[in-house]
Image: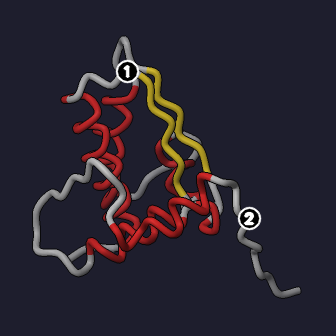
Amino acid sequence: MCTAMKAEIKAIWRGLRIAKDLDIKRLCIQVDSFNLVGLLNGEFHSSAEHSLIVAQCRSLFTQEGWEVRISHCYREANKVADALANIGCTLTAGLNMYDYPPPMTREVFFADCIGVGWPRLTSN
């Protein structure tokens, strides 16, 4: 049990560890939390609650031989990640890795591949 921000930071950290274990040298990480991008890029200061895990992430992606870019995207451009998070809420604890998109994500994955736009609804 933790905040959404801490869960997202932990997910980034775990993804970085997996990429390192798989010897992936170049990463482009898109996050729909503007604040998290600022924390990881060192543009914002983290709270005491998040400072250790943020420092661990930054230590990983600044290691020699790695090229890591972290950028913000709107939630509408992150529908596959959102679908995977919803699946994760139904699973037991542990790591689940997929070689192919799970059936529950295929529709949004295909839409993303062909460039379907998702309008962002805002109020004035």
Task: Report the residue that reaches farthest toward the top.
Answer: 65
User: In this figure, what is the number of numbered marks?
Assistant: 2
Q: Is residue 108 left or right of residue 104?
A: right
Q: Nearer the viewer, residue 42 or 37?
A: 37
Q: Is residue 52 visible?
A: no
How packed is label 1: few (under 14 Cα within 10 Å), some, or many (20 or more)? few
Q: Nearer the viewer, residue 118 or 70?
A: 118
Q: Nearer the viewer, mark 2 or mark 1?
A: 2
Q: Is residue 98 visible?
A: yes
Q: Point out residue 84 in the picture as x, y percentages from the top left corner.
A: 36, 67
What residue is shown at x 22% (from left), y 28% (from top)? Answer: 22
Q: Point out residue 95 in the picture as x, y percentages from the top left corner.
A: 15, 57
Question: How far is mark 2 from mark 1, CA to CA?
Answer: 30 Å
Reply above or below: 52 against 35: above
Secondary structure beneath label 2: loop
Q: Nearer the viewer, residue 34 or 109?
A: 109
Task: Report the residue that reaches farthest toward the right.
Answer: 124
What residue is shown at x 53% (from left), y 40% (from top)? Answer: 70
- The amino acid pointed to by label 1 is Lys
Dot 1 corresponds to which residue?
25
What residue is shown at x 30% (from left), y 61% (from top)? Answer: 49
Q: Point out residue 34 in the picture as x, y percentages from the top left corner.
A: 60, 57
Reply above or below: 100 against 43: below
Q: Nearer the viewer, residue 45 or 34?
A: 34
- The amino acid pointed to by label 2 is Gly
Q: Quadrant of the N terminus?
A: bottom left
Q: Which mark is residue 117?
A: 2
What residue is shown at x 46% (from left), y 22% (from top)? Answer: 67
Quarter of the image for residue 3 reads bottom left
How packed is label 2: few (under 14 Cα within 10 Å), some, or many (20 or more)? few
Secondary structure beneath label 1: loop
